[in-house]
Amino acid sequence: MNFEFPEISAGLIAIVAVAAVLIIVLIANLKVVPQAYRYVIERLGEYHSTWEAGLHFKLPFFDRISKIVSLKEQVIDFPPQPVITKDNVTIQIDTVVYFEITDPKLYTYGVENPISAIENLSATTLRNIIGDMDLDHTLTSRDVINTQIRVILDEATDPWGIKVNRVELKNIIPPREIQDAMEKQMKAERERRARILDAEGEKRSAILIAEGHKESAILKADAVRETKIREAQGEAEAIIAVQKAQAEGIKLLNESKPTEAIIKLKGLDAFAAAADGKATKLIIPSEIQSLAGMAASLKELVKDDKDPGK
């Protein structure tokens, strides 16, 4: 069986080929710019435009992408730079610069090598700033140095379409002999602080002990004083009680209207109490003498009654 194909003219084939080439060229020149990126476009060797994020078409054979620029914040860690301080000490300082591109056109055409330019500029600025400081001031003024470098770099890189956000001094490395001296100084300072703390502790302990002795003496004195006060109060109360008892006795005696004989007997009791052996000399009233003689006679009579043999 023979198949017959329709004849295709050469012109149709050429048209199809050209259309296919045009489609391929069109597809090849469709560009999608990602987020946070910018494309710098040149037309016939001259800056034409800056593409933002989205779909774009590049004119074939006339346009070309000169540079792809990232708008993200970038970090550059520069190697240590030798810097001489005001007191002639050579130290090594490495810096970290945080920057972002704000103008892709200026970044593309403003300077030949922006990163190298920033590195050299930061090194020069660092030497100028550290040259006006001594070593101790440099070690304690990181924030001041960071701020000064950032301001100078930001102003210098503005024509390049670069904004410097932060500058950090990563390390400040003094010479080895300076490090040894600093370590000895820090060790001596720590020892001095330790001795001060020990002395303050001993002082505080002595103060507490003295205050304890003082409070103890005060408490003892208060106890003695309180004891004496209570003893005096007890004695006073006893005297008052005795006086009240005597007064009550006299009152009762007066109310009972005692006879003369009872009064003489009371006087005899008082004489007996006085003659307890402690006195060396006694004066006896005549009434009491006669009463005593009568009492002695009565005593003899009682004795004779008990002894009938006499």
Image (cartoon, helix red, strand yellow):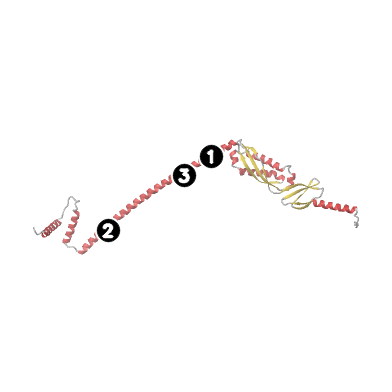
- Tell me residue 60's x, y (percent): 82, 49
Residue 275: x and y in percent read 18, 53
Residue type at the position of mark 3: Gly
Q: Residues within 10 Å of mark 1 (few under 14, many from 20)?
A: few
Query: From the image, which quarter does the C terminus lie in?
Result: bottom left
Q: Mark 3 points at which residue?
A: 201
From this viewpoint, which residue is outermost toward the bottom?
A: 256
- The x and y percentages for residue 145 are 63, 42
Q: Residues within 10 Å of mark 3 (few under 14, many from 20)?
A: few
Q: Name the residue under label 1.
A: 187
The furthest residue to the left? 310
Identify the mark nearer the N-term, 1 or 3.
1
How would you rate the neighbour count of disc 2 (Cα within 10 Å): few for under 14, some for 14-19, many for 20 or more? few
Quarter holding the N terminus is bottom right
Question: Nearest the camera: 301 or 307?
Answer: 307
Q: Is mark 1 on a helix, strand or loop?
A: helix
Mark 2 / mark 3, whichever is N-terminal: 3
Residue hosting label 2: 241
Q: How far apart are marks 2 and 3 (CA)?
A: 59 Å
The three-letter amino acid code for the residue at tag 2 is Ala
